Amino acid sequence: MKISNNFSRRQFLKKSAAASATLFLPNPGFLLPKTKEKLGVALVGLGYYSKDLLAPALQRTKHCELKGIVTGSPHKIPIWQSRYGIADKDVYNYDNMHKIADNPDIDVIYIVLPTGLHAKYSILAAETGKHVWCEKPMARTADECQAMIEACKKNKVTLSIGYRMQHEPNTQTIMKFAKTKPYGPIKFLKAEAGYYDGRSDHWKQNKELGGGALYDMGVYSLNAARYATGEEPISVLSAHHETTRPKIYTEVDETTFFKLKFPSGAIADCSTSLGKGMNTLKVDCANGWYELSPFQAYGGIRGKTSDGQLLNKRIPNQQVKQMDDNALAIKRNQKLLVPGEEGLKDIRIVEAIYESALKGKTIKL
């Protein structure tokens, strides 16, 4: 598909999401030089998250650096080149992205596109022989997630999903609590993640592109329920959708509520929205409680426990920590903190939540 100045980003996204042809690319047998100090990262998609968060963070990382871009918007190229000193040879579009296979300066391809395009371009990235980082949620379906995992295994590259919270120290304390149970067995938890999105014609309102509150923000609530209990849910007890803007949210959910049951008997009451703000994780145990509020804000995480302990550890930048953790794991040939399998687990549950809402009944997992 030829991308030109006259071809709008929206047209590109719609056509890309609808494309069914599989791209077969040679595997160059990419091997990372052990002496390389910083891994070169190419960002695929130059929207808000890349422009305002990832690119600036890559100026502060110790183990990786911004080396390339992939975009379908030619007018953005000179801005990025001027700001970050990106060479002409490190600029790609969606037609020639496969040529990154021949670029030794790029070691990692970071997919920062609408959810409905994650699988297609993650697979393409894997086939270049470069390591793959993909933003959350991993993909629209569990089958797409599995295809991404298999493509990376086939091409002997790693795959990490952008769950930045699992790299954050207060969240890691909550994950430790799930194992050590300092306040006794977990009985109930509430996880709420949402914000008001005032846009009325955005891909997040497009079903084909993976829009909807559950995909966009709901995976924060879902992932939190899993890491806060340290368990995998055995059922979606119930789920339902609501909207206050039915003329905008015609294809996808604006607000979704869902309840999960875990093997220990713990119940998670979760909600997510693109229509109102919510940002709390609270865990009630037999002998006390603890919470993070906010639990997924860019500006920092804050929390406390029932016995007065503050969960207020600070890190300068969450994206820096996430990308450096991933890069260091690659350099040391160590296990990734959030591999593709973690994203797959969430999407399997997301599909069950939608099924529960549609059928109005409990869905066993």
Image (cartoon, rainbow, N blue to C red):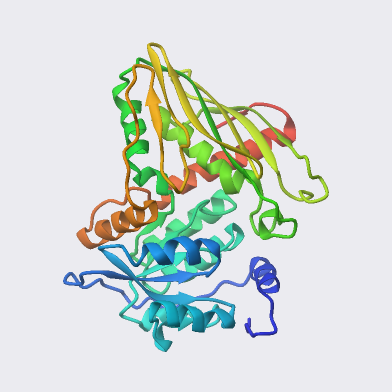
> In which quadrant will I find the C terminus?
top right
Camera-nearest residue between 332 and 247: 247
Camera-nearest residue between 145 and 214: 214
Q: How many marks?
A: 0
Residue lying at the far right in this picture: please name it. Answer: 247
Is residue 1 rendered to the left or right of residue 281?
A: right
Camera-nearest residue between 332 and 246: 246
Residue lying at the far left in this picture: please name it. Answer: 35
Q: Quadrant of residue 89?
A: bottom left
Q: Quadrant of residue 238?
A: top right
The location of residue 52, given as percent across then percent down, is: 49, 63
The location of residue 70, given as percent across then percent down, is: 49, 76
> In which quadrant will I find the N terminus?
bottom right
Residue lying at the far top in this picture: please name it. Answer: 287
Q: Is residue 122 above or below residue 3?
A: above
The location of residue 132, given as percent across then percent down, is: 40, 63
Q: Is residue 209 above or below residue 41?
A: above
Is residue 169 rendered to the left or right of residue 212?
A: left
Q: Quadrant of residue 88?
A: bottom left
Q: Is residue 12 above or below residue 202?
A: below
Residue beneath the point at 23% across and 58% down: 333
Residue beneath the point at 52% across and 70% down: 46
Camera-nearest residue between 116 and 80: 80
The location of residue 318, given as percent across then percent down, is: 38, 51
